[in-house]
Image: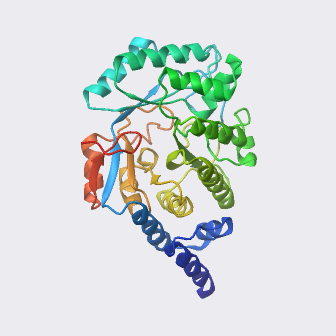
Amino acid sequence: MAELNGRIEAIGKRVEGGERLTFDEGVELFERATLLELSALADRVRWRLHPEPVVTYVIGRNINYSNVCWVKCSFCAFYRLPGSAEGYVLSKDQIFQKIQELVELGGTEILMQGGLNPSLKIDYYEDLFTSIKARFPIHLHALSAAEIIYITHISRLSIKEALKRLKASGLDSIPGAGAELLVDEVRDRVSPLKDTPTAWLDLMQTAHELNIPSTATMMYGMGETLAQRVEHLMKIRDLQDRTGGFTAFIPWSYQPNGDELKGQGGTGYGYLRTVAVSRIMLDNVKNIQASWLTMGPKIGQLSLQYGVNDFGSTVLEENVVTTETTRHLMTLDEIRRNIEDAGFAAKRRNTRYQLLE
């Protein structure tokens, strides 16, 4: 045990000195460090990047504009195949109503995602985004990488051309959803019809080069190895070195919800270890966002001692990762109270992580 503690102590000294850790050191942390050691190291990195005792949040709303999707990811119980009687595409009026409700609450961000719907080409999104922007002063954080890649395919466009057109129509930033784990073996097993890890990374790189920022995510607990989680982190870090376009990283555990995947899901203990290693390894991604939606408010609050500096969005509505047993939606007051009870000042931000009055 002394030998193992000595190895973690050596890694800790490198973290204290602001040095970048290697892949092997990331695996070592996952496998050998205690929870308290991970908390101490992740907290040190957090304070280095954010020296003020502030935790941020954004007032936002998820809008799942369509649930029609043909990709059939094994972890998703939200999608309905094309032609299903349970499939839908929200009307403009329905979407406008949802945005109006958010604006009346002082909201600034719409997270808009759906499925890979073969009936919706790029002109649908151009018209929808233009209509939204004409009516509301809202930030459109919209379309996962998988959605955009599919839009380019069915619209016969290059990635760059499609992104330029979406940006001109009002797309402000891209959510990091759909990354799952950026490891070929895992992706081939859990979502074999979805784009490859390389395609996800290439899409994000092109977006960043066009000054379209994005977040990045990691869904773990699908039967992957700890080394594969670190491989995912390394790929995010490498791309961030090249572009600087990731505003935040959000790890979250797979949520068993009646889908086809028989993964192990995640515990609060496993989440805290994962978010801490993420904070330590991703030295070039400034913000780490809590995943209280999947882990619950108290684990979200506790994660503020494991490198997390942002509590994410008020959400208001979520249909993809929540089920009746994992529905942890919080009011704005509850978000602020969880932050303040942990000893931080709760500060409202926009999607670009700029503080608001």
In this picture, is 50 found above or below 38? above
In this picture, is 243 found above or below 268? above
Q: Nearer the viewer, residue 236 or 29?
A: 236
* Placement of the N terminus among the 4 image quadrants: bottom right
- Residue visible at 48% across and 70% down in the picture: 41
Q: Nearer the viewer, residue 339 or 322?
A: 339
Quarter assignment of residue 67: top right
Q: Nearer the viewer, residue 105 or 238?
A: 238
Mark yes or no: residue 12 visible. Answer: yes
Q: How far across and down, in percent of the image, does residue 273 sit?
A: 52, 63
- Residue visible at 49% across and 34% down in the picture: 173
Mark yes or no: residue 95 visible. Answer: no
- Residue visible at 69% across and 18% down in the picture: 154
Q: How far across and down, in percent of the image, does residue 86 sit?
A: 54, 17
In this picture, is 229 found above or below 99? below
Name the residue furthest front: 210
* Placement of the C terminus among the 4 image quadrants: top left
Q: How far across and down, in percent of the image, does residue 312 sit?
A: 39, 45
